Each structure stands twice: as C-alpha cells, then as structure tokens.
Image (tube, rainbow, N blue to C red):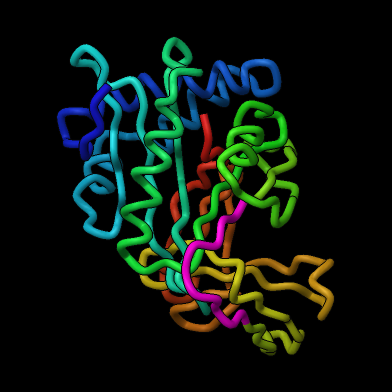
Amino acid sequence: MDLREATADDVGSIREVALASLAASYGHAVDETLLSEAVENWYGADDVDEDIADPDTVFPVAVVAGEVVAFAESYVVDRRERVGEIDWLHVHPDHRESGIGSALLERVEDELRDRDVDSIEGKVLVDNEAGTAFYEREGYDLSGERVVDIGGEEFQERLYRKRIGRDGTLREGIYETADGETVYVAFDEGERGSKAPFYVAYADADHESRYGYFCGNCEGTNVAIDTMDAVECLDCENRRKAARWDAAY
C-alpha cells in the first residue's frame, strides 16, 4: 500500500470509493438514492479538481496494486483557534480492517500538525458504528452531538476532536441581528466558507437553542441553508458547499 497526494486523474476512482464506502456504512440507514445524490453533490469532477488544487486542502489517497482504494480530505479553518477539519476519510469496503484507515489518518494528522493546528476534528453519523469506533480507537474524544438534516431526514451526528497543539482561547461573541434579536456566536463551532468561516449562532447564552449561522465575512445572520446543508450568506455571497456528513469510512 502506497500513500500519495491525490491528482486530477484520481477523480473517477475517488467517486467510486466514496459511493462504495457510503453504501457499506449507511446502506442500512440511508436511502440509496440519497447516497448517490450526495456523491454527485460533493464529488462532481469540477469540485474534486478544485479541492485537489487548493493549497489549503490535505488530500492523500491510498493505492493498492495500482488502484485508489481509500482517500482522506481535510483542511485548516481559522476560528478563535486553528482547527484541522477532516471532511472525509473513506476506505473501500474490500480493503477495510487492513490498517489503511489508520495510515491515512496518521498522514493527515502529520500534515495538519505541520500547519500548526491546535486540534483536529471529524464528524460521523451515529449510524456509522465503525466510524465512531475508529475515531475512539485513534484517540479522539467525543466533544458534541447534534441533529443534522440530510435530504429532509434527521440524523444524529457526533463530533470527535483531538487536541494536538497549544491550547487556544475559545470565545463567544454576542451580536444583535437586523431584526433586533440577540444571538450568541460560538467561535469554536465554525465551518469553512468561500470568503470566511460560518460560525454557529445560538438564541440563548447556554447554547441550547440553535439560531442558525453567523457569517464571519460580513458579520451578519442573513444566512440560508438548503436541504443538503449547503450554506450561503445572502448579503455577501459567502458560501459553504453541501455538508459532507461523514469523516470516517
């Protein structure tokens, strides 16, 4: 097994691995049509080419006998601390339980550590028992759980985190919306946007009632979310692609 950086020639193989991996992990819980739609949304050829070419993205693949059998994708998000977010870590079902997932994760962690991140995060749906067990086995701590909407269906998602750098100071901001409502912005809960991060905004100081997103580019809350969890600020056109809701297997 060899590890190398992904290239534009790997796009087709990456899509095949993603679909096979998602079907194996979620076929019992998620409709096949939704899985196929998710791969089309997340792994269109142009999108993958763009991600591979992005210098801020870590995108290694694992190759066995000349074929791509696994891949991982992650990037750095500057919140109030510097976080490495793992978007995907997928291993083809025929090559699981062979150490490839652990080797890919180690490669990702090494590259993110070189970029001076404070912690690394991965999100996994609760229905993916192998994925949650993987992160726990690799030394990640469960740091939160939330409900996510995928194609009109609700699923429980777990956030795993490993702190690997200096301790960052996490802060909250209190803002007033254009409608005069007070929101509490959690700067330690952010998602990468095309212009700046989106931060989770809450309607209460205890962070129990979620309000929506706060745009880090224009500092507004006029943010729309579609059924695939794509996010767009309607004031400044800051965008986040449709959410990729599994970062392991």
Q: Give the answer, above or below, for where 230 lies relative to 5.
A: below
Q: Give the answer, above or below, for where 28 lies relative to 230.
A: above
Q: How many marks?
A: 0
**Which residue is pictured at 42% across the width and 75% down the height?**
236
Q: Give the answer, above or below, for where 71 lies relative to 170.
A: above
Displayed quadrant of residue 30: top right
Question: What's drawn in magenta, residue-wise?
Answer: 160-170
Q: Give the answer, above or below, for where 210 lies relative to 54.
A: below
Q: Residue 227: x and y, percent?
A: 61, 44
Residue 65 is left or right of residue 70, and the answer is: left
Q: Residue 31: x and y, percent?
A: 64, 20
Residue 132 is left or right of residue 75, and the answer is: right
Point out the image quarter for the N terminus: top left
Q: Residue 88: x and y, percent?
A: 45, 39
Judge by depth and name the residue closer to the eye, 222 or 200: 200
**Which residue is pictured at 62% across the width and 22% down the height?**
26
**Which residue is pictured at 73% across the width and 69% down the height?**
211
Judge by depth and name the residue closer to the eye, 96 or 123: 96
Magenta stretch encompasses residue 150: no
**Which residue is pictured at 69% across the width and 46% down the height?**
158
**Secondary structure, magenta segment, majority class:** loop
Judge by depth and name the residue closer to the eye, 101 or 56: 101
Q: Residue 48: x and y, percent?
A: 28, 40
Displayed quadrant of residue 194: bottom left
Magenta stretch encompasses residue 161: yes
